[in-house]
Amino acid sequence: MKSNRDDLVSAFFPSSDSAPVEWLVSDGLTGYEAALTFMEQRVAAIREGTAKELVWLVEHPPLYTAGTSAKDSDLLATDRFPVYATGRGGEYTYHGPGQRVAYVMLDLKRRREDIRAFVTALEQWIISTLASFNVKGERREDRVGVWVMRPDRPALPDGSPAEDKIAAIGIRLRKWVSFHGISINVEPELGHFDGIVPCGVRGHGVTSLVDLGLPVEMADLDRALLESFEDVFGAVER
């Protein structure tokens, strides 16, 4: 029997006359301001019908971004890295080398005009990708992102099991075209997350695939992301 979440995800394949989604991987480190400019231009072109939908995979130099719900008190190290205010939803997030950022520019008018369902589909994409490495990613109703249990660590003070965040989600829509997207920790410097309260969530840690003991390369993750994306969102232009 299908769950409600299955129903939410199932409608995100595009209309039958849509072209496959373009898939772009950038080498090296991409500056954040340059990424914002590129996304703004591409989103406008998608809405105008002059460009294909796009998933763009990048790595950034170390930086913090502030979403529309960011609280000043959650920026713990004000002069550690550059801080960029951005129009995506959510709170403070760290980006840096060893973390894969996937910017997702899809036309939801061709798919489904439902923000909650879109976020659920993004979660499913991440969870399916992690499953390729035998990592069980989980959703939390009261917290954004994707989480992994840490049975190797002591329980929290309230008795609940320890768990860490491995992936973040932050999106923005303009005329039903999405931008910003997701990030998955492959092998970032986890200490860099100490300068913020990641996504406003206190009392939990942050992990990565390598921190979990998995010798995963960025290219390995990219292949898994592509295959899982097609299962959730439809064909990619390879």
Image: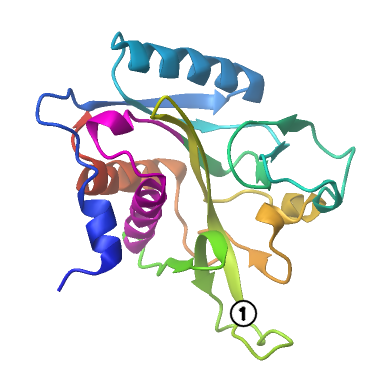
Instruction: Report crowding for label 1: few under 14, some 14 to 19, many 20 or more residues within 10 A (C-alpha).
Output: some
- Could you tell me residue 50's position as x and y percent? 30, 8
- Could you tell me residue 118's position as x and y percent? 37, 46
- Could you tell me residue 227's position as x and y percent? 25, 45
**How is the rendered protein coloured?**
rainbow
Q: Residue at x 18, y 35 (%)?
A: 235
Q: Is residue 210 visible?
A: no
Residue furthest toward the bottom? Answer: 159
Looking at the rendering, the stretch of residues picked out in magenta corresponds to: 103-131
- Could you tell me residue 236's position as x and y percent? 22, 32
Q: Secondary structure at mark 1?
A: loop
Q: From the image, give the main secondary structure of the stretch colored magenta.
A: helix
Q: Residue at x 19, y 34 (%)?
A: 14
Q: Is residue 34 visible?
A: yes
**Relative to the observer, which residue lies in front, 18 or 7?**
7
Q: Residue at x 49, y 20 (%)?
A: 39
Q: Is residue 47 above or below residue 213?
A: above
Residue 106 in magenta stretch: yes
Residue 140 as seen in the image, left or right of residue 125? right
> Which amino acid does the dot numbered 1 rest on?
Ala
